[in-house]
Image (cartoon, rainbow, N blue to C red):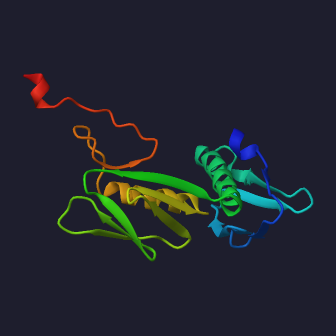
Amino acid sequence: MSRIGKQAIAVPSGVEVKINASNRSIDIKGPKGNLSFDWRQEVDVQFDEEAKNINCTVVAGDDATRQARALWGTTRSRIYNMVEGVTKSFTKKLKIVGVGWNAKAQGSTCILSIGFCHTVDLIAPDGVTFEIEKGTEITITGADKQAVGQFAANIRSKREPEPYNGKGIMYHDEVIIRKAGKAFGA
C-alpha cells in the first residue's frame, strides 16, 4: 500500500479546486497561478468540500497491480505539488562561474554569454519567470514544479560544470568535486 497515496491533501483558503470525473482532470486555481492535471484511469481523485481535502484512491479492480499502486502515490504527489505551487510557488537558483560569462534578460528570453562565439537564447515557458542578479545569478520561479525544474535543467545543460577548472552553470547549492589534472600526476 502506498503510504504517500493514503495521505489527504489539505486545500488552503483562497484555492479553488474543480474536478471533472468524466475526463479524469483536476483544475486548481490560486493566487500564484492556475494548473491542471489529467490523472490515469487506475486512480480515482475526490474533493471533499466540507473538510477541504483531496483524497486519492486506487480503483477497486486494480488493487493488486504494482503499477496502479505506483501511480497512486505519483498522482497524490503531483496534486500536492500543484496546491503548493499555486499558493507559494517554486524556485530554483543557478549561478554562472567563468571569466566573462554572464546572462541577460530580454523579455521572456534568457540570453547566455557562456564562452561560445555566439549567445545562447532560451525562452521561458508559460507560467515561469526568471530574474538575473549581478549578471551571474539566475532565479527561476513558477507555480508548476516540473516546468521550473525543466527550465533550470535546460539552462544548466548549455554549459554543465566541469571538474578541472570549476567553470559552468550550476545550481546554487551544487558542489563540484575538483580533479587535479595532468600536472599533478607526473
State which quarter of the image contains the C terminus: top left
Q: Nearer the viewer, residue 90 or 70?
A: 90
Q: Residue 91 in the image: state x and y as whole percent.
A: 56, 55
The residue positioned farthest toward the front in the image shown: 134
Residue 138 lies, with reference to residue 118, above or below; the image says above
Task: Using residue 69 as the reference point, say whether residue 18 is left or right of it.
Answer: right
Looking at the rendered structure, the number of numbered marks drawn on it comes to: 0
Residue 42 spot, x, y in % from top left: 66, 56
Of residue 14 and residue 46, the one placed in the foreground of this image is 14
Where, by quadrant of the figure, is residue 64 drawn? Answer: top right
Choose between 43 and 4: the one closer to the eye.
Answer: 4
Residue 1, visible in the rendered structure:
no
Where the N terminus falls, by quadrant?
top right
Residue 60: image location, x then y, percent: 75, 52
Position of 124 with respect to 26 (left or right) is left
The residue located at (36%, 54%) in the rendering is 156
Tell which residue pokes out farthest to the left in this image: 186
Outermost residue to the right: 50
Using the image, determine if residue 175 lies above or below residue 98: above
Q: Is residue 171 visible?
A: yes
Residue at 68%, 63% (x, y): give it.
86
Among the 4 quarters of the image, the one containing residue 138: bottom left
180 left or right, relative to 103: left
Q: Nearer the viewer, residue 28 or 152?
A: 152
**Image: 90 above or below 38:** above
Question: In screen coordinates, is 168 left or right of 139?
Answer: left
Image position, residue 107 (x, y; %): 45, 77
The residue under the point 90% across, 56% down is 51
